[in-house]
Amino acid sequence: MTTVPSSSTTALADARIPAGHPFAAHLRRVAEAERRAPHALWTPEDGPLPSLYVSHGAPMLFEMTGWMTQLHTWARDLPRPKAVLIVSAHWESAPLSISATTPTELVYDFGGFDPMYHRMRYDTPAATELAAQVAGPGRPIMPRSKCRLCTATDAAVAW
């Protein structure tokens, strides 16, 4: 798990999760694991990392201790990546385009769940450098202002 500065909105939102909630307990276990043995960063000598499809699921996943533990254990067995590239079916364009949006607000497109889930956050880092690397030399990166499909909803879907 990426260490989040204590001043981040993610950390502030995490601090508001009730102490007895399964996700709060998971965050404590993750912090303790990171304290005992910091997650090793990926290096080129590690070779390529696997591709992974993770369905965004629903808020109840944050109540499923077994699921969170299994995913975290699997992730800790791999070196921590320098970046994550998301390929999203929510963005379609011809010709193929690459966008690097600045961090955006999450859109909570669900209802009927504990209001706590609407306060959860994940502050994404800017990804302009990664987008340029993926595009290759001389290939343009679509600025957010020109991306007709880069709405707040689309940008937040792949968080």
Image: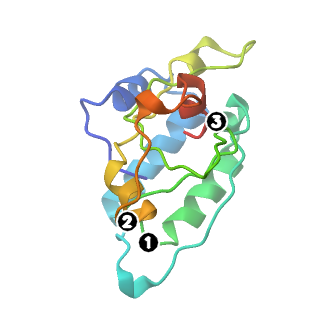
Q: CA distance from mark 3 to mark 1?
A: 24 Å
Question: Which residue sits furthest bottom?
Answer: 45
Specify the quadrant of the image occupied by residue 69: bottom right
Looking at the picture, which amino acid does disc 1 mark? Pro
Dot 3: element = helix
Q: In what element is the residue under mark 1?
A: loop
Residue 93 is drawn in which quadrant? top right
Q: Quadrant of the C terminus?
A: top right
Residue 39 marker: 2
Determine whether 17 is above or below 126 in the image.
above
Question: Few, some or many C-alpha atoms within 10 Å of disc 3 (few <14, some 14-19, many ≥20)?
Answer: some
Q: Residue at x 32, y 42 (%)?
A: 4
- Left or right for 122, reference 22: left
50, 17: nearer the viewer: 50
Q: Earlier in the sequence, mark 1 or mark 2?
A: 2
Q: Would residue 146 be found to the left or right of residue 36 on screen?
A: right
Query: Can you give x and y, in whole percent of width and height, for residue 14 in the image?
Result: 43, 29
Disc 1 to disc 2: CB gap under 8 Å: yes
3 vs 1, front mark: 1
Q: Which numbered tag is attached to residue 79?
A: 1
x 72%, y 32%: residue: 58
Task: Name the kind of residue labelled 3 in the image.
Answer: Phe
Say if 80 sits above or below 117 in the image: below
- Expressed as whole percent of the image width and height from the top left, the position of residue 27 reads 47, 42
Q: Circles 3 and 1: CB distance less than 8 Å?
A: no
In contact (CB < 8 Å): disc 2 and disc 3: no
Residue 80 in the image: state x and y as whole percent: 41, 65
| Three-letter amino acid code at the position of disc 2 | His
**What residue does disc 3 label?**
62
Q: Rounded to the nearest whole Å, what is the CA distance between mark 2 and mark 3? A: 22 Å
- Element on which disc 2 rests: loop
